[in-house]
Amino acid sequence: MSKAKPLLPIASSAEVAPLQFGVDGEQAERDWPLITREEAQAVFDRFPSIGALTGLTWHSPRPFSAAVLISTSSGETLFMKRHHASIRDVQGLAEEHAFIAHLASHGLPVVEVLATPEGETAVTRGEWTYEVHSAADGLDVYRRAMSWTPFADTSHAFAAGHMLARLHVAARDYAAPARHIRPLLSSFRALNETDLIGALDRWISAQPLLVSALEERDWRSDVTRVILPWHARLAPFLPALRPLWTHGDWHASNLLWTGDTPGAQVSTILDFGLSDRTCAVYDLAVAIERNAIEWLSAQDARRVHLDHIDALLNGYESLTPLSDDEYAALVALLPIVHTEFALSEVAYFHATLRSRQTADVAYDGYLLGHARWFSEPAGKALLDHLEKRKRAFRASV
């Protein structure tokens, strides 16, 4: 079954499109057309202080939106990202931009989000929502790395863990409420409830596109059979998890680096598109799931980078040690941390991109398949490793 075209097509760019990262590897067909030079210039007109556009230098291969690096007459390089309004509107981008601004005020290395003379950090044009960022400092070492691919070195994993801890410390006094329920967020709303099925019922019911995508599936039975046993292990530790705004997509490719060799440090944190009010343990579990398990490899060849996991956690706990209950929650949460995001992907592929085939991959392979893997020998070995891991840093209780 071929993948359907986007819901609202626009004219394609005359440039040759780079391969896009898909749910099971690279794909030649893009979900969203490239940003064209004419389109970018029209957006630039809303930001008169940034000068004239002189060229488009690189198109991002990442899914869910279109993004491009742009050179300007001032010699500055800017980053423009375009979202369909059904995925992110101006209010949705304002939520994450406010979090970025808070982190910047606490000294975190984040990009500057540009604003129009009216103070808007996102603008609309037709069915699209745009944001423009300053160029970030550092090397894009992992530009060609997809999520679910490992760090280049354990020292990078340690540095990433330490920077994640810095982000969590800076976020402690950020009091904004959770984001409005939107597609493609790293959500911890249902998993954070003791009654998982009831919480998922309410969360799904608030999203008509997800309701539609699940109409032909017995999701309650599937979740009860595959997800709920893991959640039962997590539930006793939920009271120990303090709400916190988090990044939600902590992968090496969302970081820029001081160099491309062992020992390099994180120079800039990128891409807060999945951020929301979750908890620190959630963000750590996402970081392990995205960086240390080679989900894209065939199951009999799938590697688990235990040394990277240890380095990531050591880097994190060197600044903010986890309590015993938080650490136990991390082990319990890891097999199911993807639950709400995977369901959101099901809605996105089914209703927005109209690709039943890809929605099936998100449901069967991602939502259920990742959780099932932790009951198999390799997954059990990972959890056993975490439970027996000697922690160099322990929180005082």
Image: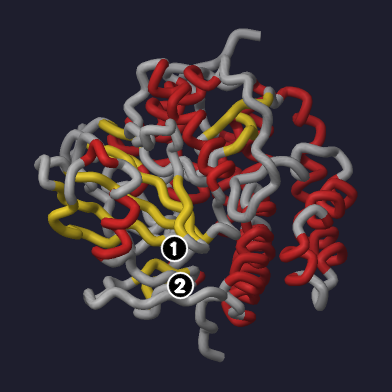
Q: Marks 2 and 1, Cα distance to the nearest angstrom?
A: 7 Å
Q: Is residue 229 or residue 132 the one in the foreground?
A: 132
Is residue 312 left or right of 233 when viewed as pictured? left
- The residue depicted at 39 percent of the width and 61 percent of the height is 66
Q: Is residue 363 above or below residue 198?
A: below
Q: How crowded is the residue under tag 1: few (<14 C-alpha within 10 Å), some, or many (20+)?
A: some
Residue 116 location in percent, x, y?
37, 37
Q: Is residue 389 or residue 191 the one in the foreground?
A: 191
Picture quarter with the N terminus:
bottom right
Counting residues from the start of the chain, the first of labels 2 and 1 encountered is 2
Q: At label 2, which amino acid type do we have?
A: Asp
Residue 35 location in percent, x, y?
32, 64
Q: In the rendered image, which residue does mark 2 sit on?
A: 31
Residue 129 location in percent, x, y?
47, 54
Q: Is residue 191 above or below residue 162?
A: below
Q: Answer with the quarter of the image where residue 263 lies.
A: top left
- The residue depicted at 65 percent of the width and 59 percent of the height is 344
Q: Mark 2 touching mark 1, by CB under 8 A? A: yes
